[in-house]
Image (cartoon, coloured by chain):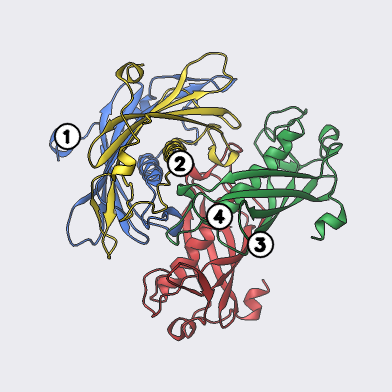
Chain colours: A red, B green, C yellow, D blue
Amino acid sequence: MAYEFKITRRMEFSETDMAGIVHYSNFFRYMEAAEHAFFRSLGFSVVTQQVDPPVGWPRVHASCDFKQPLRFEDEVEIHLLVTEKKSKSLSYEFRFRKLGAAQAGEIARGRLTVVCVTRDAQGKMSATLIPRTIADQIEVAPPELLAM
Amino acid sequence: MAYEFKITRRMEFSETDMAGIVHYSNFFRYMEAAEHAFFRSLGFSVVTQQVDPPVGWPRVHASCDFKQPLRFEDEVEIHLLVTEKKSKSLSYEFRFRKLGAAQAGEIARGRLTVVCVTRDAQGKMSATLIPRTIADQIEVAPPELLAM
Amino acid sequence: MAYEFKITRRMEFSETDMAGIVHYSNFFRYMEAAEHAFFRSLGFSVVTQQVDPPVGWPRVHASCDFKQPLRFEDEVEIHLLVTEKKSKSLSYEFRFRKLGAAQAGEIARGRLTVVCVTRDAQGKMSATLIPRTIADQIEVAPPELLAM
Amino acid sequence: MAYEFKITRRMEFSETDMAGIVHYSNFFRYMEAAEHAFFRSLGFSVVTQQVDPPVGWPRVHASCDFKQPLRFEDEVEIHLLVTEKKSKSLSYEFRFRKLGAAQAGEIARGRLTVVCVTRDAQGKMSATLIPRTIADQIEVAPPELLAM
C-alpha cells in the first residue's frame, strides 16, 4: 500500500517564458509526470493495459497555487500525496520544493482529481470502478502528513 | 470599463495526447491567451511597457474543472469574466464552450488569479498597485452573470 | 488543384522563452498547423476518416532555417507551398513573414516531408498510395514561385 | 576537450499526440536538452553568465529525420556529437536510440547549428566569437564516429 511518491526534475530552457521563469502551464505537466511515475512504482502504467477492460484516467479537476518562481536549470522535487480514494476516482496533492535551495520555502502546491474510465467502441468514456489490483495498492496519506 | 471578453480558437493536432483528446495542460495556455487578448482589447499589452515602471502579472492561482473532452479541430469559445478586482490583483473565470455543438454543455470552467508586480534590478518581483490607467478600465462582472 | 495556402497567427506568451523570443520548437508546430489548415481548405481533415481505409501522415523529415526572431504578440504569416508530390509522400516549404513589419525580411523558412500511411490492428504503420480523392487536389507549386 | 555527450529520457504522456506517438516537435526540445546537458558537463550553463560579456546561442538551423516512432514511457538515449566548430558557431548531430529495444535501429537523427551572440541594450543580437574558455573545451568528433 502506497500513499506518496517523489520525483525530481531539472527545469528546461523550452519550459521558460519571456518573464525568465518556468511557464505556469508546465506545473500541470510535472504533476502528471509524478502521477505516472507513482503508477510505475506500483508496477502499473497508466496506459499499458494490465487490467481488463483497459482503463484511462482523465482529469476532472486540476489546480495549483504558485508561491515562488522556478528558473532554468533549477532542480525541483515534486512530492505526490494521495489525498482521497473513492471507488471511481483518486485525488492527489503535489508539493514543489527546490533542491539545494538555502531556504526551505515551498515553490508551489497543486491538486489533481482523476476519474477511472473505460471507453466504448466510439471512444466515449464512462466512469468505472478502479480495478482491484490497482485500488488494493493505493491508500490515502496519513492526516499528519496532509496537514503539513 | 470592461468585465468580459471572448475568444475562439481551433484545437490543434500538437495539443492532443494519446488518449485522443486535448491535453489538460493546454487549457491553462488557452486561459492565458484569453487574458492577454482581453488586455489587448483595452489597448494594453501585458508585456509592452505602457506604464512606468513596467509591471508584470505572475499567476498565483490557477484551476480548472474539466467536464467534457475537446478533440482535434474542435472550435472552442473561451469566455473570460472578471470575478475579483483588488488593489494589487485580478481574478478571472473562464468558461469553455464548443462552437457548433448540438448540445450546449460546458466543456470546462477555469479560474486564474494574477498579481501585479514590478521587478528590481535583480529580477526579484514584488506586488504593486495596479496602475490607474489599467485599473480604471476593468471592473468585476455583474453577479447575475457570475452566478450562471 | 491547389499548391499553396496561407495562415496567420499571433505569437503567444507561452510560446516565448527566457531569451525573450519564440522558442524554435514552436515553428514546427506552426508548420503543421498550416499543413492541417491547407487540408481543411481542400475539404479534408488530416484525421477525420473521409477515405477508406483511413490514412495518417507521419513526418519523416522536418527542418527550419531561422533568420530573425519572433516575439510575443508578433503577427506572422505562414505561407505553405507544395514542393514535391510522390505516390506515397508530400513535401512542403513554409515561409514565415512578420505582418506589419517595416522591412520585408523573411523570418524563417521550413520544410516538411510527410508520408501517407495506413495502420494495421497493432498500430504498426506502413506507407501507402495517397488516396486519389486527396492526390487529385494537390499539385506542386510552379518553379518560379519555389525559386523565390 | 569534449566532442560528444549522452542523455537518456523517458517519453511523457503530455508529449504524445492523438496518433499515439511522441509529437515530432518534441524531438527539437530533446535535442536542446542534450545540448544544455553537454554544456553543463563542461562546467558551463548556456545561460548563467560565466563569460563577460554574457553570450547566447540562438538556433539558425534545425532538422530531423524520423525513422521510427517513439511512444509513451519509451526510454530514449540521445547521443550528441559536435560536427562543426567555427569561430562564431557550433553544429551538432543527435542520434536517438530506444533503450532496451530488441532491435538496435535508430529512431531519429537530428542536426542543430547555433550561433554565439551578444545582445545590445535594445536586445538586438549580433554574432560574436565563441569565448576562449568555452571554445577551448569543445572539439569536432572524429570522422569515423561521424561516418556511422
Name the front one of labels 2 and 4. Answer: 2
Contact between marks 1 and 3 (CB within 8 A): the answer is: no
**Residue at mark 4:** B25
Are callouts 1 and 2 both on one chain? no
* Number of the front mark, 1 or 3: 3
x%, y% of residue B6?
A: 70, 44
Mark 1 vs mark 2, CA separation in Å = 47 Å
Query: In the current view of this chain or complex, which residue is farthest to the left?
Result: D144
Q: Of discs 4 and 3, which sits in the foreground?
A: 3
Residue D16 is left or right of residue A2, and the answer is: left
Q: Quadrant of residue C34?
A: top left
In the foreground, D105 or C126: C126
User: As shown in the figure, which amino acid type bears the numbered disc 2?
Assistant: Arg
Q: Tell me, for residue C40, which label it has, or none.
A: 2
Q: CA distance from mark 2 to mark 4?
A: 26 Å
Return the chain for callout 2.
C
Q: What's the amino acid at mark 1?
A: Pro
Which mark, by number, is residue D142?
1
Residue at horizontal 82 percent and vertical 55 percent from the top: B145
